[in-house]
Amino acid sequence: MLSVIAAWLFYDSFLAGFLFAPFFFFFAKAVSMAKKRKYSEMLTEGFLRALSSVSSSVAAGISPENAFVLAESDMEDLYGRKSAIVKELAMINSCTVMGQRLENALNDFARRSQIGEIYDFSVVFSVAKKNGSDISKVISSCTQMMEDRRQAENEARVLIRAKQYEQRVMCAMPPGILAYLRFSSGNFMGVLYHNPLGIAVMTGCLAVYILAIWLSEKIGDVKV
């Protein structure tokens, strides 16, 4: 659909939409990456809250294995049974019930999620268990560090959220202006279509427009 609209706006030909077909792969990949990023953020937030629950339970004298079972129940009340974090905690608890070590189950979770914070925690937890360290302090310390990092990320996002909104509005304006001119001043725009020079100019404009969108999205992608 987007390729057809772009073909009509920039080339006055719906058939030109087939020229944009190869770019659908890149668009689909960008959408997939955006969904994956959102999923990772939700899973990280859920894991952080689960760790807070685990930390409180372990501090009260409950074993880490049972603490994760209680955390699954807490996250189910908070996010629902079908949420990503509850499914992951259920998988971890199923592994420990079947006799697998908790640290190994956490390592598997870290590999599945490919989230840095979860991987770091699994490594620290494994080393702490191996060396007989105070698990309660280790979990509490990791939770606090993750909360501080999460807070820094949220503060950074709040600062640029308004600018991101402005950026998306600005990105929507060029096609809107072009469509307005097509409808209101068709003869004025006619010189840009169906001739080599006009096609070259519109192709250059389209390339600059796509580049501007890509750069603005890269600048707005905040990572702390």
Image (cartoon, rainbow, N blue to C red):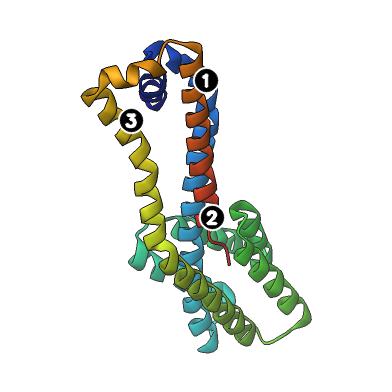
Label 2 or label 3, whichever lies nearer to me, is 3
Q: Is residue 20 left or right of residue 103?
A: left
Q: Amino acid at mark 2?
A: Ile
Marks 1 and 3 sit apart, C-alpha to C-alpha, by 16 Å
Task: Measuring from the top left, give residue 15's x and y in whole percent.
Answer: 41, 11
Q: Residue at x 53, y 43 (%)?
A: 214
> 213 or 141, which is in the foreground?
213
**Circle 3 SS class:** helix
> 50 or 185, which is in the foreground?
185
Task: Measuring from the top left, give residue 124's x and y in whole percent.
Answer: 70, 74
Q: Amino acid at mark 3?
A: Leu
* Sequence order check, earlier mark of 2 and 1: 1
- Checking the image for residue 22, the label placed there is none
Q: Which residue is mark 3?
A: 178
Q: Amino acid at mark 1?
A: Ala
Marks 2 and 3 sit apart, C-alpha to C-alpha, by 26 Å
Residues at discs 2 and 3 in contact (Cβ within 8 Å): no
Q: Residue at x 38, y 64 (%)?
A: 76
Q: Residues within 10 Å of mark 1 (few under 14, many from 20)?
A: few
Q: Which residue is mark 2?
A: 219
Q: Quadrant of the C terminus?
A: bottom right
